[in-house]
Amino acid sequence: MSSSDQPPDRLYSAREPIFPRRVSGRFRSLKWWIMGVTLGLYYLLPWIRWDRGSNLPNQAVLIDLANRRFFFFQIEIWPHEFYFVAGLLIMAGLGLFLFTSALGRVWCGYTCPQTIWTDLFILAERWIEGDRNARVRLWNAKWDFRKFRLRSFKYLVWLLIAVSTGGAWVFYFADAPTLLVDLLTLSAHPVAYSTILVLTLTTLIFGGFMREQVCVYMCPWPRIQAALMDEDTITIGYREWRGEPRGKHRKAEGAEKLGDCIDCSACVNVCPMGIDIRDGQQLACITCALCIDACDDVMEKIGKPRGLIDYMALSDEARERAGEPAKSVWKHIFRVRTLLYTALWGAVGIALLAALFARSPIDMTVSPVRNPIYTLLSDGSIRNTYDVRVRNMHGEDTSFRIFVEPDSYRLEIEGAEGDLVTVPADSTGLQRVYIVAPAGSEAATSVRSDLRIWLHDQSADLKAYTDTVFNGKMK
C-alpha cells in the first residue's frame, strides 16, 4: 500500500470510558457524607419556611428577581447592597486559594458540584449494571435485550436525577410550593420550563457522559492550581522509594528486592479519572483519595504498612527516603502563604459582618433635576427640583420626615402635606421635592451652594442624609 493510500493520523483519540470500581474506606465514607449533606441542602433549602412578617415572603432562601431582592433566612440583600455578594465571591476565591495551597485540589475531590453529581451518577450506574468488571463486560457485549434493558433503565434514572437537579434550581427563584403546583399544572412561566430543560441536559451530559472530560478540558482550575501549590502543599502522592521496584510474584526468586507495591492496579481501577497515581502528580488528578483507600486495603491484606499512597508533601520526600519522620501536617498547613490567605479571607469576612450589622433599615438617594437648573419665582426666590428616592427596609409601612439643612431653605414635597411621606413596607418610594432659597439670600445669589437633605424615621428615631448642591441665579 502506498503512503497516499494510508488513512491520515487522527488529531485526537476518542474518549475511553472509565468504570471505577467500588471501594470502601475512610475517604470514601467522608465523600459519601459530604455528598449527602451538600445534595440534601441543595434539594431541601427552598422548602424551608421562615416567617418575616405579612408583607415579606416566607421562604428561607429566595432569589426574588422580580423585586430585585435576595433573602437568606433573616438577612435581606437589596440591589444597592450588591457589595455583600461581591464580598462573598471574593471570600470564595480566597477560600479556594487557601485550601489549594494547603491541601491541593481538595475542593475538586470532595465538594465540587461536578464531582458530587458524577459520584451520584456512578452510584446509580453501579446499582443497575454492577461493579467495574460487570460494567466492562456489558460495555464490550453485543447489543441484546439484557443490554438494552439495563442501559435504558440506567438512562432513565440518570434523567430523573438530572430533572430533579434542574427542578430544584428554579425553586430558589420563586415560592417553591406555588411554583411546584404551576409546573405540574403546566401553568408556570416558560422561563421556568426552559431553565429546567437546560439544567437537565447539562447535568445529564456532564455527569453521565463527559465526567472526567469536564475536569480535564473544560474546567480552568487544574491549570490555575499549579501557581498555588508548592513543595509544602499536602496532596496525594505515591511513595515510590517504598513501592519500587513493583512486582506481583512475591515467592519467586529475587522477591526480597521488590518494593511494597504488588502492581495490582487497585489504585487505577478505583480512580474516577482513570489515571495511575504511581506516575506522579497529573493535571487530571482531583485528589479524591479513593486510591488511598484502595491501596491501604491491599497493604493490610498482604501485611504491609498503610500509606504507600497517601496525602504527603514534596518537601518530605528526602526526609522519608532517609528514614526520618515527615514534618508535622500543621507545619505544612500553617506557613506564610496560607496564613496570608487566611488573614485576607478573615478580613473580608469581618468587613462584611461589620457592614451587615451597621447598615441602616432606611436609605435615600437624591438626584437633582437639571432641566431647568433652577426656576425664578415671581417673588424673586430661587427654586431647585430634586428626585428623592426613599428606601424603606422595614417590614411595615413607615412615615418619614424630609427636611433640609441649613434651615434657611424652604422645602416642599409634591403631593404631600407638610414634610411627611409614607413609604410602603419593604419597598422604595420616589418623591419630587422642591427646595426654595428666599430672594436676596446668599444661596439665591450664589452660583452653587452646599446643602444636606435629611430623612428621619420618627418611629424608630433613625436618620439618613445625602449631601447635594443648590444652584442659584447665574449672573
Image: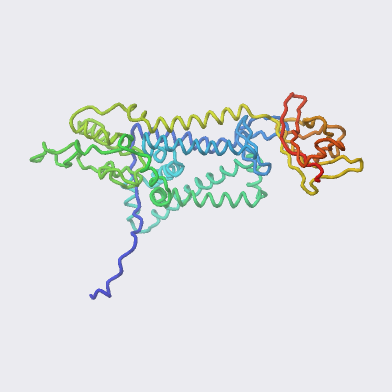
Give how far across and how far down residue 189 sits, in percent: 66, 50
**In-front residue for pair 75/48:** 75
Instruction: Note whether 134 is above or below 49 in the view shown.
Output: below
| Residue displayed at 92% across by 43% down | 378
| Residue displayed at 31% across by 45% down | 282
**In-front residue for pair 121/233:** 233
Give how far across and how far down residue 9 sits, in percent: 30, 66
Residue projecting furthest to the right: 378
Q: How is the image coloured?
A: rainbow
Q: How many marks?
A: 0
Which image quadrant is residue 470 in?
Answer: top right
| Residue displayed at 87% across by 39% down | 381
**Relative to 403, 38 lies left or right:** left
| Residue displayed at 18% across by 29% down | 323
Give how far across and how far down residue 221 sits, in percent: 41, 45
Give how far across and how far down residue 132 sits, in percent: 33, 46
Which image quadrant is residue 411 in?
Answer: top right
**Relative to 275, 34 lies left or right:** right
Residue projecting furthest to the front: 475
**Relative to 302, 111 lies left or right:** right
Q: Quadrant of the N terminus?
A: bottom left
